[in-house]
Image (spheres, rainbow, N blue to C red):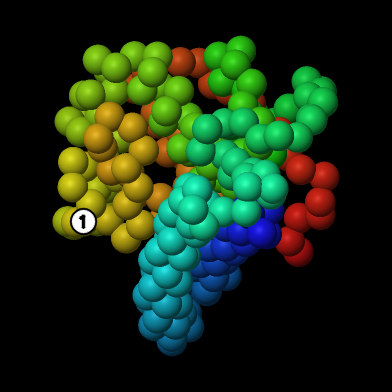
Amino acid sequence: MNTRISKIKISLEQLSEDLLALSDDMWLSIDHNDSEALDLGYRLKKDYNEQVDTFSKVVKNINDTLAEFEENSTLNDSSTPIHNTGNQGRQNQKFEYNENQAHSINEDFCYKRPCGMKLENQIYEGLNTWKAIYRQTIEHLSDKSPDIFNQLLESEFAKSRRTNKVYVAVTPNSMICPEEIAGGFYFETNLSANSIRDRIHQLLRVFSIPDSEIVFYLREDKDVD
């Protein structure tokens, strides 16, 4: 059963990421020079965004409940192995990394499926969603440079263009899908694949890490059309 739970958690996160990516596509598809189309598109996209935000919160609540179930030894079937979804950066599966198939941080990852990354020559496997990639990056940087990490709250990385919204905080109140990932800080995780890419890009700048020090590996399953 734990294997099924792991797959469901991954599928829910991937669906949430795809819905957020579609929001970006919707905005780009609107004719911004047509006032009527712009008004209609804005209304529909606003409604869509509100529904996706609600769905993302539900996904997080479901995943939190499933994670608690997995961790409860009195409920788990001891004969069924628990598969890591990426929070620890490892999964019990073999994967042969091919450097010729590595993808740089400057690429478009919309609707693409990750399976791992290499950050500063350290390989992390079993990262099957972009949120898992994001979590592991944050944990890596927290371990690498705690002093810099503790200053994130005051950095440009934490700020958002939207009023009353932040990407890092000591409390989760101003976030849609907050996760306490490292250092007692909460991070906003209601992000599409490319938004996560951009957040990681900003983090690398904060920690003075060149773009060349991170690459992503993608699964072979087909992208969403």
Count of marks, rendered view: 1
Q: Give residue 104's quadrant in the image.
A: top right
**Which of the pair 153/106 is nearer the observer?**
153
Q: Position of residue 69 (x, y in %)?
A: 48, 57
Quick check: 89 left or right of 167? right
- Any part of residue 66 in sight: yes
Quarter of the image containing the N terminus?
bottom right
- Taking the spot 51% from the left edge, 67% from the top edge, the residue there is 23
Q: Secondary structure at mark 1?
A: loop
Quarter of the image containing the C terminus?
bottom right
Depicted 115 relative to depicted 37: above or below = above
- Taking the spot 69% from the left edge, 48% from the top edge, the residue there is 79
- Any part of residue 191 in sight: no
Quick check: 98 left or right of 34? right
Depicted 192 relative to depicted 196: above or below = below
**Which of the pair 3/57 is nearer the observer?**
3
- Taking the spot 52% from the left edge, 32% from the top edge, the residue there is 88
Q: Position of residue 166 (x, y in %)?
A: 24, 48
**Which of the pair 143/107 is nearer the observer?**
143
Depicted 59 relative to depicted 114: above or below = below
Q: Position of residue 8 (x, y in %)?
A: 62, 61
Q: Position of residue 224 (x, y in %)?
A: 73, 61
- Taking the spot 56% from the left edge, 20% from the top edge, the residue there is 119
Q: Amino acid at mark 1?
A: Ser
Instruction: Mark 1: give few (<14), some (14-19) or many (20+) Cα within 10 Å.
Output: some
**Which of the pair 86/148 is nearer the observer?**
86
Depicted 105 relative to depicted 38: above or below = above
Q: Give residue 22's quadrant in the image.
A: bottom right
Q: Give residue 13's quadrant in the image.
A: bottom right
Residue bearing the label numbered 1:
174
